[in-house]
């Protein structure tokens, strides 16, 4: 399927099979990536016991996506979202194959893990905007709110499932083979994208500018809008300060409480269950003062498995 034939935004009569196949593939890839993230973080904790090592891993997982994310949104509007998602998954899987080879050969170093985590974070900065922007193009408007709800529910359920599965993988197979789960799930995520096309929005002639112009327009809007400016400053501070510090929970469990991968997995699963409960509460009781709700929720750092995968 060429990029040029993805020009219509109508989902078509077969939208259900296409949406569910793509959604199931991306769900599999998401679970595999979260599982791998847990395995890598536990390996860094177990191998080093170092606060600085975990902090570096946190920056490697967060900073590239934060920097590339704005470009990812522009790319998703200009080029085939399907091909962007395929390329991002393929690069991430290739990085993991290199890391697996290093583990199995006994030549792995800590900086190898940092580089692979950073590359995967960069790919997530491309894949996530493309995947999010694809949802409205895959379903009719009447199903859009349900599709968005399914996407958020999947993200929460991933936290509940990925950490225990990661702990099980660590306890039952060599680390290199445990990382291979991510490669397998990436292939499962790519396969539906090779079969089904994702419609692209139609851009009128002359309505599309160059990438830098679009980035400048977006930055100008954020800078001139007081509410957006403050919101972005808050999110940037949380991303670069609060979220990396959440990695220290893993070290706290291991060093202070003498826990293992199972105990860390239980904590992350509890965090995922809390997210699901919070989502249900917000759905049943729509908050009247949404800013206070958002600020209160953002003050709680996300679990490391919610980092870019």
Image (cartoon, rainbow, N blue to C red):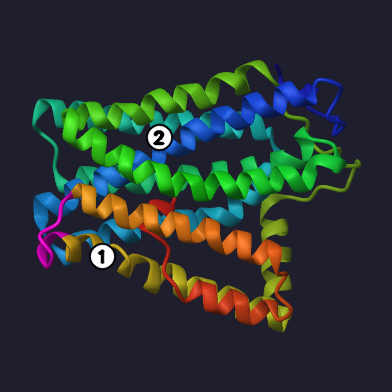
Q: Earlier in the sequence, mark 2 or mark 1?
A: 2
- Side (left or right) of 202 relative to 20: right
Say which quadrant the C terminus sits in. top left
Q: Nearer the viewer, residue 103 or 208?
A: 103
Which span of residues is magenta-colored?
Answer: 254-260
- Mark 1 Cα shell of 10 Å, populated few (<14), some (14-19), many (≥20): some
Whether residue 305 is in magenta: the answer is: no
Question: In the structure shown, which secondary structural element does the residue marked by tag 2 occupy?
Answer: helix
Residue 32 circle label: 2
Q: Is residue 66 above or below residue 97?
A: below
Say which quadrant the N terminus sits in. top right
Residues marked 2 and 1 touching at CB (< 8 Å): no
Q: Position of residue 275 (x, y in %)?
A: 51, 59
Q: CA distance from mark 2 to mark 1?
A: 22 Å
Residue for point 39% across, 72% down? 242
Q: Quadrant of residue 76?
A: top right
Residue for point 62% across, 32% down? 23
Residue for point 47% across, 33% down? 29
Residue marked by disc 1: 249
């Amino acid at each position: 399927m060429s990029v040029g034939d993805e020009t219509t935004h109508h989902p078509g009569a077969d939208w259900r099979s296409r949406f569910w196949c793509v959604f199931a593939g991306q769900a599999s890839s998401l679970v595999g990536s979260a599982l791998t993230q847990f395995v890598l973080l536990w390996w860094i904790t177990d191998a080093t016991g170092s606060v600085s090592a975990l902090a570096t891993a946190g920056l490697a997982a967060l900073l590239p996506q934060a920097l590339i994310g704005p470009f990812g949104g522009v790319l998703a509007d200009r080029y085939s979202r399907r091909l962007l998602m395929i390329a991002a998954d393929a690069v991430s899987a290739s990085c993991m194959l290199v890391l697996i080879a290093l583990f199995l050969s006994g030549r792995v170093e800590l900086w190898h893990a940092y580089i692979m985590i950073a590359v995967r974070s960069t790919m997530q900065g491309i894949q996530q905007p493309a995947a999010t922007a694809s949802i409205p193009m895959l379903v009719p408007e009447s199903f859009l709110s349900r599709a968005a709800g399914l996407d958020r529910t999947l993200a929460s359920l991933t936290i509940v499932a990925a950490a225990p599965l990661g702990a099980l993988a660590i306890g039952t197979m060599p680390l290199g083979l445990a990382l291979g789960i991510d490669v397998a799930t990436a292939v499962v995520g790519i396969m539906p994208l090779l079969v089904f096309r994702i419609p692209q929005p139609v851009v009128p002639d002359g309505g599309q500018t160059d990438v830098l112009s679009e980035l400048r327009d977006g930055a100008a809007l954020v800078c001139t809008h007081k509410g957006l400016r403050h919101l972005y400053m808050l999110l940037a501070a949380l991303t670069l300060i609060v979220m990396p510090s959440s990695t220290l929970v893993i070290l706290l469990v291991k060093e202070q409480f003498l826990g293992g991968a199972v105990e860390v997995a239980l904590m992350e699963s509890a965090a995922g269950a809390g997210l699901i409960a919070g989502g249900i509460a917000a759905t049943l009781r729509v908050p009247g003062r949404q800013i206070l709700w958002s600020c209160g929720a953002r003050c709680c750092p996300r679990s490391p498995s919610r980092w870019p995968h």
